[in-house]
Image (cartoon, helix red, strand yellow):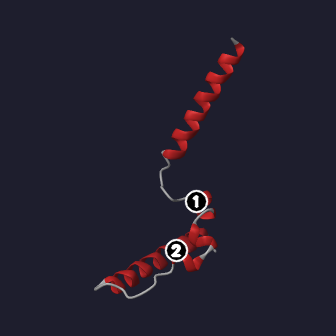
């Protein structure tokens, strides 16, 4: 009887943990996802090889500019 209760409690705790992990407010955000991000450890694996498609280069530059602007704003807010 005691073992059954322990197994049920462990199952409920595991399910609650899984649900909490899967319902993150910001997918891909947080220190754990950054730690295990492939590009963090091997930048070359994330680099584009070959030519861009039409308009893709401008899009990439625009996105990079926006990301840089957002990062600068976060740094200013943090006081660094």
Q: Helix, strand or loop at disc 1? A: helix
Q: Which labelled disc corresponds to residue 72?
A: none
Separation of marks 1 and 2 at Cα, in angstroms: 18 Å
Which residue is depicted at the point 34% across and 86% down?
A: 58
Q: Which labelled disc corresponds to residue 71?
A: 2
Viewer-proximal residue, 6 or 71?
Answer: 6
Give the image quarter of residue 76: bottom right
Give the image quarter of residue 59: bottom left
Residue where numbered disc 1 is placed: 33
Which residue is depicted at the point 51% across and 59% down?
A: 28
Residue at the extreme front: 50
Quadrant of image for the N terminus? top right
Which residue is depicted at the point 33% across and 82% down?
A: 56
Q: Position of residue 72 (x, y in %)?
A: 52, 77
Residue at the extreme left: 54
Q: Helix, strand or loop at disc 2? A: helix
Image vertical order of residue 14 relative to residue 59, above or below? above
Quadrant of image for the C terminus? bottom right
Residue at the extreme right: 2
Of labels 1 and 2, the one closer to you: 1
- Nearer-N-terminus badge (1/2): 1
Q: Position of residue 5 (x, y in %)?
A: 66, 17
Image vertical order of residue 50 relative to residue 23, above or below? below
How crowded is the residue under tag 2: few (<14 C-alpha within 10 Å), some, or many (20+)? few
Q: Position of residue 13 (x, y in %)?
A: 61, 31
How crowded is the residue under tag 1: few (<14 C-alpha within 10 Å), some, or many (20+)? few
Q: Position of residue 43 (x, y in %)?
A: 58, 78
Total residue callouts: 2
Residue at the extreme bottom: 51
């Amino acid at each position: 009887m005691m073992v059954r209760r322990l197994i049920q409690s462990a199952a409920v705790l595991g399910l609650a943990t899984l649900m909490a992990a899967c319902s993150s407010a910001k997918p891909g955000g947080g220190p754990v996802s950054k730690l295990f991000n492939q590009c963090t450890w091997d930048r070359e694996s994330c680099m584009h090889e070959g030519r861009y498609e039409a308009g893709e280069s401008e899009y990439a530059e625009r996105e990079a500019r926006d990301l840089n602007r957002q990062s600068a704003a976060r740094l200013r807010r943090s006081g660094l």
